[in-house]
Image (spheres, coloured by chain):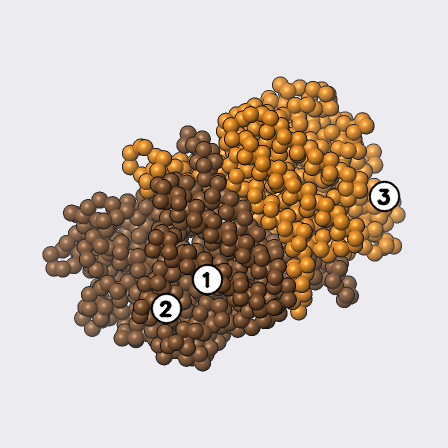
Chain colours: A orange, B brown
């Protein structure tokens, strides 16, 4: 059973991701280290003891649709109630609406724990928090006063409605239509698909944020507006009133996260009785500027999905590790005990476990570093622009690399279990099935890679990414001068990876400058992985230097000598592989 | 929907795996090219039109256990009947028992097609064929006369009973007991788990091959005997008679291959009524030599499971490719048509598809090459020993690499589908869930890697693997002199990969010689992948030279410039990574 790795999380936040320094300089307001520790400790307890035990029943029962209502698995409604009564939903919410206003670093750390407990549970509140951010940044004071207190407390939950059958990665193709009602409100008509937690029985109301098009809107992404559409129209006293004309028509039968209802939502089909059809909505932000508003929500949702990758990898590692210490098969060179050796003594099993551990570790450190950049940007001051660029740079990496790692590690976890891993009751397969969605939703990992390579690298004319790479070199250099055992070899390997990252970065910047866009697009996916692996080496070096812990130093060495070397071939693929890809790709057009 | 790639399969058999030359020299008996082509064509039709359409219903309904009987999904029993009436089960069976005695190369090629149609279907007959081989090689004439005609025709099916709860990879730990009945037969008592097709309604009888221990047997693997235990004891006329004391107690609820019943089999629990308890069995081969007999069956089963990896990868590629040509999103630089571009025009999607295609291609070519070696060894003559070593060398590579590729390609297939890939009705997830068992069963991929690195490399004091590597160099060199466009760069990359393979091979041989076993075990998994990637490059070079087909040459170049480079880091991990792995691994012992 999952136990939240509170000590490792706290160490990574403070000594790798930058929370230590940020606490000292006051960039995190009046948050104290003691308070941070207490929050992590208590979240760890709740995630381990209350969320994780409901993961498997969630998978088996799933969310069930009956008469346009979604029934959640046994115990889940009560779990959500206890969770929000514990104040967890309000952790990062704005103080003026009842939130605790705590930094992103803390909220991603506890989010990791909820998702290790159960990804299907963790994803629901993530959307509420995204809705809070979007409304706080863009909605009118009246909307904020009505909705934010309840969304911050978790009494109501939020959703994000972008996708339509013909509009997935290409959100500009959406057709849902919004008409001005003449009284300042709007009426929405259309169908949205893949709406996470679009309907459920957790909360008294559900607040949908919906992208739609006004009748006179320009085509494409410049004609999209954002609307707030509640399931129940609030009464003057704020309580849920009349049922709005938005209904869940079906929920998807998915590979995993069965307890997370993925809904097809129908707006304005007249299901709400004798009123005129049309879902009543309120504009958020300005007309035709909806995409910008939604991006507020999406960027943080991307990091939150990255955290899901970290979370499921951590849960898979713990499960496989526990099994490998119990399960005995054969003789192992290093085992001196009686009878068959626990399989954790077999070097090949150790390779699987250490690979899982190292990848999980670096995905976590990258994601927390991204949260740190968000916090520093929010803190303002002369460095705010720099930190915003840093957050922009790291967000696609945190999302895509961590979710790839989630799948890779969960798959290795199944393998470590042998035949038992393929049996559903073991629970290892659940983690792999759950993990598989994260590289897809919130912008596929291909979209993230393209975002990194073509939009984030050119920030400050390439100056930001170059400065970032220089920082990685400093981390490696500090490990060299730390005199820790075996460090020289590790440092050489980490530096070689940073060299690969630098060369591939410069090559991409040249391609973009010279208008060789297709070649840059062709190299995007290997570039993102190269970026993450190189960065991961630097972060492990930083960790090894921080306290010289023998286990972490050994993990750094293992990573440097066994895994980071992949960067050389990724560099090759980015710099020289594009033309052969495009040539071979032509045969696919058919 | 899956269409068997008959032309590509025939090309790979003839021009890459060696069937062309073998046909010419008569090593394949009186098989003609025309007959081979006709068989492939007809198998392709059956797999595409009859097997594949039942894949999804198999997944949804699964095999269901009721009162110790297993009911197969709708249409499956009839599918099996038509399949065996088509003569497909008898393809490779011995001629003297009604088989066609066709070479392994043909039987793996058609096996690929059945498994692309449905892995859950393909695995059943695979076990029957394994039973045929084991009985043909080791059973008494009387047993052969009774069982082989029906097993060859497919009227009866076979199973393989090794695993027990405490004995998985370590088969020597098994406890099922066999007692001499005094009349030449035996009585078996015990429990076997994970028995594929242990019970079903396809055939009138089920013939279990069971590993068990005699009361006076030595401990470990030297005290294991092989028994034949039929579900129904044959009457004197050969028809199924009295029900034997072997029953299916439960079937597993698995991640995939739902229609393949995975059974817990109970031997000798007295369920069969008023007779004395004990499942009636007959010895196959000699007492205490059962493992050697079982290995006959296991080796070919390993190649057959490797073929499952190829098969599911092919099905996943076709599905993703078809989707990518239909689905439209966004604009793509290379698309000149109206509106949104089919996503196959996006370079990043092309990268996914080409990676899937290249990996599937090399896994197929490796597996067919392994089958070729088996055929050449069977053909006898002065080279039989050489070809047996070749088959030994390639079997673990074909099994492990191809099944890893199955998972990797099926996962990419889900990704290419975006959100639709995660919806079960799409069928992309089915392929990934199915694929995930293949790296586990028939010896986990870790076991295969250890087999390759510690048992197969030392064949002929390393002479065999060295000669093999020299052959790979010749393939690369031939491409260099072929003057095909862009070949020079590809050849350089392929040769670099062969250099990596050679260096890692020599390093492993030294480790083994010096008794550094743990280090060799630590490097086994990266070594196997390195071996396959290097070999794959040489085989693609061979294909490019064979007919200069532009599409295949472009694929070779894509592979050489984008994928094969991984060998450099794998070489590093094998040669230098072991010590850091073992050091970090100590922390895991706990």
Residue drawn at point x = 44 percent, y = 64 percent? B369
The nearer-to-camera label among 1 and 3 is 1
Q: Is residue A86 above or below residue B334?
A: above
Q: Quadrant of the C terminus of chain A?
A: bottom right
Task: Left or right? Give the position of B127 relative to A270.
Answer: left
* Quadrant assignment, res B425: bottom right
| Foreground: disc 2 or disc 1 | 1
**Disc 1: which residue:** B471
Q: SS for tag 3?
A: loop
Tell me, yes or no, whether dots 2 and 1 are on the same chain.
Answer: yes
Q: Chain of mark 2?
A: B
Q: Is residue B219 above or below residue A79?
A: below
The residue indicated by pointer 3 is A286
**Measured Cα–Cα span from mark 2 to mark 1:** 19 Å
Q: Which mark is residue B375?
A: 2
Observer-nearest of A263 and A312:
A312
């Amino acid at each position: 059973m999952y136990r939240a790795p509170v000590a490792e999380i706290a160490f990574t936040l403070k000594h790798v991701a930058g929370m230590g320094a940020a606490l000292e300089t006051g960039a995190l307001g009046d948050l104290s280290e003691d308070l941070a520790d207490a929050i992590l400790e208590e979240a760890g307890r709740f995630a381990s003891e209350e969320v994780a035990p409901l993961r498997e029943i969630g998978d088996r029962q799933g969310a069930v649709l009956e008469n346009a209502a979604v029934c959640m698995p046994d115990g889940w409604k009560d779990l959500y109630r206890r969770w929000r009564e514990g104040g967890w939903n309000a952790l990062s919410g704005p103080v003026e609406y009842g939130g605790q206003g705590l930094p992103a670093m803390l909220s991603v750390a506890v989010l990791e724990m909820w998702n290790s407990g159960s990804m299907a549970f963790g994803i629901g509140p993530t959307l509420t928090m995204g809705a809070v951010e979007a409304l706080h940044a863009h909605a009118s004071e009246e909307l904020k006063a009505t909705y934010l207190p309840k969304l911050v407390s978790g009494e109501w939950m939020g959703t994000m409605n972008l996708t339509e059958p013909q509009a997935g990665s290409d959100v500009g193709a959406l057709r849902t239509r919004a008409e001005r009602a003449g009284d300042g409100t709007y009426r929405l008509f259309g169908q949205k698909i893949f709406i996470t937690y679009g309907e459920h029985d957790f909360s008294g109301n559900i607040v949908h944020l919906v992208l739609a098009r006004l009748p006179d809107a320009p085509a494409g992404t410049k004609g999209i507006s954002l609307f707030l559409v509640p399931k129940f129209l609030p009464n003057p006293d704020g309580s849920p009133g009349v049922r709005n004309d938005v209904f869940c028509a079906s929920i998807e039968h998915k590979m995993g996260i069965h307890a997370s209802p993925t809904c097809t939502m129908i707006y304005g089909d007249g299901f709400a009785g004798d009123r005129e059809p049309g879902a009543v909505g309120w504009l958020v932000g300005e007309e035709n500027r909806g995409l910008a508003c939604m991006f507020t929500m999406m960027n943080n949702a991307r990091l939150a999905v990255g955290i899901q990758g970290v979370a499921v990898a951590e849960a898979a590692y713990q499960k496989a590790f526990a099994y490998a210490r119990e399960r005995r098969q054969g003789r192992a060179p290093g085992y001196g005990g009686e009878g068959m050796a626990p399989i954790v003594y077999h070097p090949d099993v150790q390779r699987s476990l250490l690979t899982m551990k190292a990848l999980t570790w670096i995905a976590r450190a990258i994601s927390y570093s991204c949260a740190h950049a968000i916090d520093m940007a929010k803190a303002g001051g002369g460095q705010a622009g720099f930190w915003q660029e840093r957050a922009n740079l790291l967000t696609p990496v945190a999302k895509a690399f961590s979710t790839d790692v989630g799948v890779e590690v969960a798959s290795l976890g199944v393998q470590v279990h042998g035949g038992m891993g393929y049996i559903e009751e073991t629970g290892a397969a659940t983690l792999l099935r759950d993990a598989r969605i994260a590289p897809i939703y919130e912008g596929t990992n291909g979209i993230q890679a393209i975002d990194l390579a073509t939009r984030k690298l050119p920030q400050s004319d390439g100056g930001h990414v170059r400065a970032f790479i220089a920082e990685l070199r400093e981390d490696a250099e500090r490990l060299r001068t730390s005199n820790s055992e075996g460090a020289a070899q590790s440092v050489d390997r980490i530096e070689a990876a940073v060299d690969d990252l630098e060369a591939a970065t410069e090559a991409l910047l040249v391609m973009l400058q010279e208008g060789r866009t297709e070649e840059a697009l062709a190299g995007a996916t290997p570039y993102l992985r190269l970026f993450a692996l190189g960065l991961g080496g630097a972060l492990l070096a930083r960790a090894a230097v921080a306290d010289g812990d023998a286990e972490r130093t050994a993990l750094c060495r293992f990573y440097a000598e066994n895994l980071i070397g992949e960067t050389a071939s990724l560099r090759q693929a980015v710099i020289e592989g594009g033309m052969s890809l495009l040539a071979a790709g032509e045969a696919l057009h058919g």
